[in-house]
Image (tube, coloured by chain):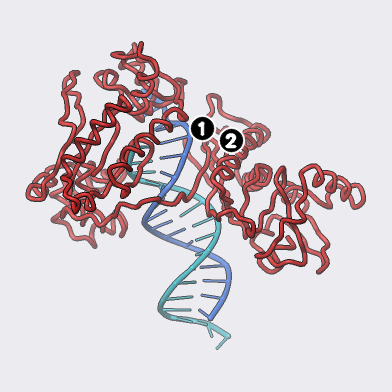
Chain colours: A red, B blue, C cyan
Amino acid sequence: MHADLDAFFASVEVLDDPSLRGKPVAVGGAGERGVIASASYEARRFGVRSAMPSVVAKRVCPALVILPGRFDRYEVYSRQFHNIVRDLTPDYEPLGLDEVFADLRSLRRLGVRPLDAAAALRSRINGELGLFCGVGLGRNKLFAKLASKESKPRVVDRGLIEGPGVFWVSPELETQWLAVLPVRALWGVGPATAAKLAQLGLTWVRDLARVDETTLAKHVGASMAAALAAYAQGEDRREVVVDRALKSLGHDQTFARSLSGANEVYEALKTHAAVVARALREKDLVARTISVVVRFDDLTSVSRSQTLSFGVDDEHAIGAIGEALLQSVDLSRTIRLLGLHASGFLVRNENQMQLSFGLDTVSLDAKSSATEISRERQVSSEALRDAVDEVRRRFGRTSVGTASELSEHGVEIATQRGRHAFGPEVARDESDATSER
DNA sequence: TCTGGGGTCCTAGGACCC
DNA sequence: TCTGGGGTCCTAGGACCC
């Protein structure tokens, strides 16, 4: 099963402000660089679509009300949506805030028919949340997803046509049904892949069935070719994965006015670091890899990343790493987007080596190994600052510093085992004990 | 019409290890 | 002295999903 809430963000806004009912409403950025994230069906009648630039949306629908997103609010509804699905079966996998896949095989073994389960789900979501939901049923994720699209209301000639609400692709009909869909309808086929396929004369799913997978792979890569070849046969081995682990998190921002100059970029980076650090701590994670992405005014992007031998979750540490990564980016160009991302997660726990540069704690015990750091010698942020000041007073300004300063000076630290140089490359250096670092 | 922000996955090359 | 083939990890970029 695939279940998908109708016009989710826009619908939540209408629920919270009934005066919006019946009006063309969208959620998204209203500024010059904004895009539409979600549009009510009234707005869709005018041609407003998600991912459409807001200025375009306003042009095709001058009466459009564009609201900024309130994601905390959507998350509340999303959790309730997931809870209702969970009541049906624990075998479900969220996809964003407003979609889920669910494996109904265990329900079937209990004698519950998928069509009944789908109807019950829609009824509860509408009754308890006031939202509408389309449900697709099929033999695998491929058909369930395509079917849920078919279940939705549709705009035809500026009018709205009700959808069936539930759509089931029965196994007997699935091959014929699939054959006449455009390749663009398939999961993983976006504008770029569709264009490549079009060059090969492949427009419809049935066209894919007649092309050799090896040939396909030369144009779209091995992984995509294998998926497409399977989909063309109606085969999809992807499982419903319960509790998929988070792999990365980050924060990106497109600025209403592009940034110019390193100082503006570094200021923005600090804000980003605080957002990312808070998200990590909220999830009890530390990240080994930090990356930055910069998009210039000409829409070209570059990214830089660095993987450390330990995890971080502190905004100052993350900010300093980000700043160091930006050293090799041309900041004399004007920048419309700055992103900061964390990945390579380790679960944060008592034994995890945790280097913090700020509020949190620093535990550097030269006698213990990396895996048995005790928290006994934790240093409060004030004590840390005081200690840093004292070291600088006695040994000079560059004797100890933050990671951002490492890129300029490098730092040398004396421990019971000798002296250790710290510089921009230190994170890659596995030769000395992490605990001493 | 001019392109967001949250993510995932894939590819290719290079460094490195055995 | 110059070399293979298996593997992992990291980096950068790109495509795609909602």
Chain label for disc 2? A
Q: Is residue A356 above or below residue A64?
A: below
Q: Nearer the viewer, residue A290 or A126?
A: A126
Q: Quadrant of the N terminus of chain A?
A: top left
Q: Residue at x 30, y 32 (%)?
A: A5
**Horizontally, is A287 left or right of A417 in the view?**
left
Q: Earlier in the sequence, mark 1 or mark 2?
A: 1
Q: Amino acid at mark 2?
A: Arg
How many numbered dots are placed on residues in this image? 2
For the residues marked 1 and 2, what is the alpha-carbon distance in whole angstroms? 8 Å
Q: Which residue is mark 2?
A: A333
Q: Is residue A353 above or below residue A341?
A: below
Q: Is residue A319 above or below residue A420?
A: above
Q: Which residue is mark 1?
A: A297
Q: Are marks 1 and 2 in contact (CB under 8 Å)?
A: yes
**Horizontally, is A208 left or right of A401 in the view?**
left
Other residues around mark 2 within 10 Å, as few (<14) / some (14–19) / many (≥20): some
